[in-house]
Amino acid sequence: MNPDLIAQLAEQVDEAARTGQTLTMLTAGHPALDIDAAYSVQRASIARRVARGERLVGMKMGLTSFAKMEQMGVHDPIYGHLTDAMILPNGGQLQLKGLVHPRVEPEIAFTLASDLCGQPTPEQALAAVASVHSAIEIIDSRYTNFKFTLIDVVADNTSACRYVVSEGIPLGGMDLGNLKIEMDVGGREHRKGSSQAILDHPAKSLARLAAMLDARQEGLVAGQTVLAGAATAAVHVAAGDQVSVQVEGLPDVHFSISA
Ligand code: 0L1
Ligand code: MG
């Protein structure tokens, strides 16, 4: 696809995220956009953030539950980039001003001890992990009414907005395959899930991310954070909400929301 068009679309998604404005789906005006071009738009939008001084600190997996893949009519998860401007400290406060229509998802996150490239097995992927964390991802699609195609959402950095991680613990012999996960949003929404909903096992999600990056001659780097994916459906948030997530065996994570 024409590099000028990639740059123009990257500017559109980046400006929408920066200013909290909604965006018409890119595919409406550019029906020829394919998944490969969508990842190029995503990459170029992250390059704009980096040029403004943000630092790339990790990656996220999206659409990791088979239920959500079925809902979107796809068979593969998607990935996005995390920058330091997206970090919310554990116990911190998220301001709604400047966001479009945020939702929260309970997740498991990894911090990497070593680079992870190529096509690792889930066991090889876990061997690269320094610590595991409970996490909350705040997603905020820039598209009107949170409606998009797979190609649009990939271009929009898979709706990445902010994320919070708990203190990390070393993996040790912990089996992450079927941990109970609970999320409370403002005392009005309580969701329960299992880490198994994350691509069957969070380690499979990490291995899959490495393989997907490898297909674009990219890889994960020591020190990066990886959000492995959501264990339940996303929940809308409102000013005044406290949001907390408990993952069996991991430290808790929480934050509050202000107008
Ligand atoms: O992190 C996620 O699973 C979200 C991926 C993008 C789809 C959405 O915004 O719901
Ligand atoms: Mg997510």
Image: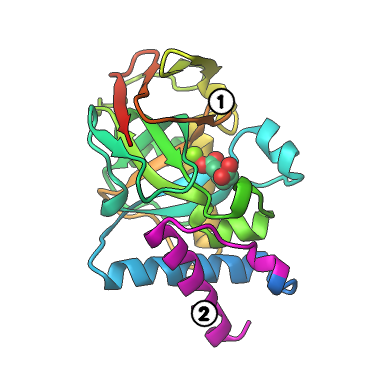
Q: Earlier in the sequence, mark 1 or mark 2?
A: 2
Label 1 or label 2, whichever lies nearer to me, is: 2
Labels 1 and 2 touching (C-beta < 8 A): no
Report x, y in % for residue 244.
36, 20
Secondary structure of residue under mark 1: loop
Report x, y in % for residue 212.
55, 55
Q: In terms of image quadrants, where is residue 67?
A: top right
> With 106 as the anchor, is 24 left or right in this view?
right
Residue that carries the numbered disc 1 in the rendered image? 232
Residue that carries the numbered disc 2 in the rendered image? 8
Report x, y in % for residue 194.
53, 18
The kind of residue tagged 2 is: Gln
Secondary structure of residue under mark 2: helix
Residue drawn 56% across and 23% down?
196
The kind of residue tagged 1 is: Thr
The image quadrant where one finds the N terminus is bottom right
The image quadrant where one finds the C terminus is top left
Q: Is residue 216 visible?
A: no
Q: Is residue 248 visible?
A: yes
The magenta stretch spans residue 18: yes
Residue drawn 45% across and 72% down?
44
Looking at the rendering, the stretch of residues picked out in magenta corresponds to 1-28
Q: How is the image coloured?
A: rainbow
